[in-house]
Image: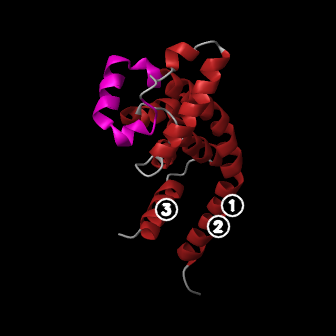
Amino acid sequence: MGWRRIGRYYRHRLFRTGDSNYKIAAGFANGVAVSFSPFVGTHVLQTLFLSWLLRASFIAGFIGTAIGNPWTLPFIFMLIYKAGVVICGLFGLTDFIALPGNLALHSFFEKPLEFMAFLFTHPFTLLLPLTVGGFVYGIVLWPLIFVVLYYPVRRARQLYDRQREKMRKGPL
């Protein structure tokens, strides 16, 4: 299947659920916000919980988690790490989150074994800034994504309903 066909399929599935515009926009916003969490294996579970809590669409949330895919996660991690370092620095946690002098983030590609060995012995060096940055990005992105998507979702649902009505009436 091509990407366009997959996109049409999920759009069709989403609008067929009968969920309200709020549920669809909030669900997608949940998925995007959770994609900025460093706990990659739990994105879907986090989205399901957040969607249940906010009474949002589970399907839209699942689709929203696709923002955190293998192509975008390195950029997302870099963004949330830098934000987390700045925020932790504001609270005086600079020594706790500092990487040793012989390692930098680009060392992951140059000396991956040494970098991973350091992370396993000092897991909070990266985990704390990633968690703090991801939480802040999620809080900032949720309302932004919701507002940006609400009206286009409403418009698309109206067009979808009109199209269904035409198909239901059939040729005259």
**Kind of residue sitting beneath label 3:** His
The label on residue 159 is 2
Q: Are marks 1 and 2 in contact (CB under 8 Å)?
A: yes
Q: Earlier in the sequence, mark 2 or mark 3?
A: 3
* Above or below, comparing residue 86 to residue 64 in the picture: above
Left or right: residue 63 compared with residue 110? right
Give the amino acid at mark 1. Arg
Magenta stretch mostly in which secondary structure?
helix
Q: Where does the image place residue 112, in percent across and percent down from the top left?
A: 32, 37
| Residue stretch in magenta | 103-127
Residue 156 vs residue 140, the one in the foreground: 140
> Disc 3 designates what residue?
12
Q: Residue at x 54, y 14 (%)?
A: 95
Q: Nearer the viewer, residue 6 or 34?
A: 34
Left or right, 16 with reference to 85:
left
Relative height, residue 17 to residue 44 (above, below): below
Identified at 64% across, 23% down, the residue is 87
Name the residue carrying label 1.
155
Q: Residues within 10 Å of mark 1 (few under 14, many from 20)?
A: few
Q: Closer to the camera, 95 or 38?
A: 95
How far from the left and from the top, in percent, is residue 73? 46, 44
Q: Residues within 10 Å of mark 2 (few under 14, many from 20)?
A: few
- The reply, left or right, for residue 135 in relation to residue 110 is right
